[in-house]
Image (cartoon, rainbow, N blue to C red):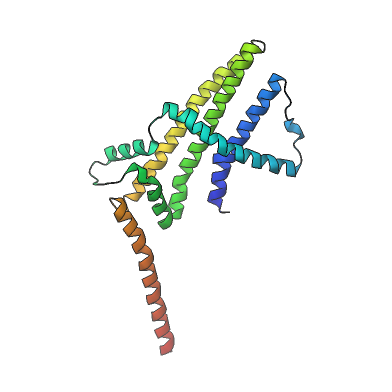
Amino acid sequence: MSFTLGLYDLFANTIPGFIYLFILNETLRELGFAHFNVTQIDHVPFFLLLTLLAYLVGHIMDYLAYRLWVRVFYPDYPEGRAYEHFRSMYPELKIQFNPSQSRLLFAAIKFLKPEIANDIEKNKVISLMLRNVSFAFVIFFLSQVYIFLFKGNSLINLSIAVASLLASIITLRRAELFHVHYYKLVFEHIVLLGDNLEEVINYNRKIPSENKSRDGTIRKSGKRKNDSQ
């Protein structure tokens, strides 16, 4: 497993999964149901199993976070907003891309310059993590409101609920900021390869053939040098 894949899984899925599990556990505790005692998690196999569960929960909840939370406030797509912003910044460029091509454009960048692609992708990873944290805050807000209304009317629970809602809104805005920035970086780097998708694909196909031709020339030159000796 490469470092990039591990980093993606950790921040986009596993850490949010742990947060979801923590909120569920705390809610069960405050409601008086059976729950885990975090201080008793001292066995490595149990921790590994919990990590796997957090990873799976993170995957599942990410779908719900996008459909039930993000799309409510941002019904349009971030790649579209990023593309329009990029074109407004550089109106002199005669680019003819479509925002729906962003995945293929990013793949072209990753094929030619994987280091740059990794730096760009970090913004998407942070965005996924933050949007899940935002959704987790919303769930915690709802649980605290329920506890406040039906389990004692404690001002502590009300204060936690208000703080969770504010944190959720702020985190969601930051998540969208990173998501749009990810696509803006894709468009900023892809214009160096071409003005439309066809030019980008042709550029990617041309580079390997040029490298192959150059390697063949070097091998032939080295062979002639050895024969002369």
The image quadrant where one finds the N terminus is bottom right
The image quadrant where one finds the C terminus is bottom left
Q: What is the tally of numbered marks visible in this picture?
A: 0
Residue at 48% in and 44% down: 122
Q: Position of residue 132 (x, y in %)?
A: 53, 33
Q: Is residue 100 left or right of residue 151?
A: left
Q: Position of residue 217 (x, y in %)?
A: 37, 76
- Quadrant assignment, res 228: bottom left
Q: Is residue 53 left or right of residue 13?
A: right
- Quadrant assignment, res 8: top right
| Residue farthest toward the top in the current orientation of the protein | 153
> Compared with residue 126, is residue 192 higher up or lower down, i.e. above or below?
below
> Compared with residue 48, is residue 170 higher up or lower down, i.e. above or below?
above
- Quadrant assignment, res 157: top right
> Compared with residue 122, is residue 164 higher up or lower down, i.e. above or below?
above
Q: Position of residue 53 (x, y in %)?
A: 65, 39
Q: Position of residue 182 (x, y in %)?
A: 42, 41
Q: Is residue 54 visible?
A: yes
Q: Is residue 154 visible?
A: no
Residue at 36% in and 43% down: 100
Residue at 70% in and 23% down: 29
Residue at 44% in and 86% down: 226
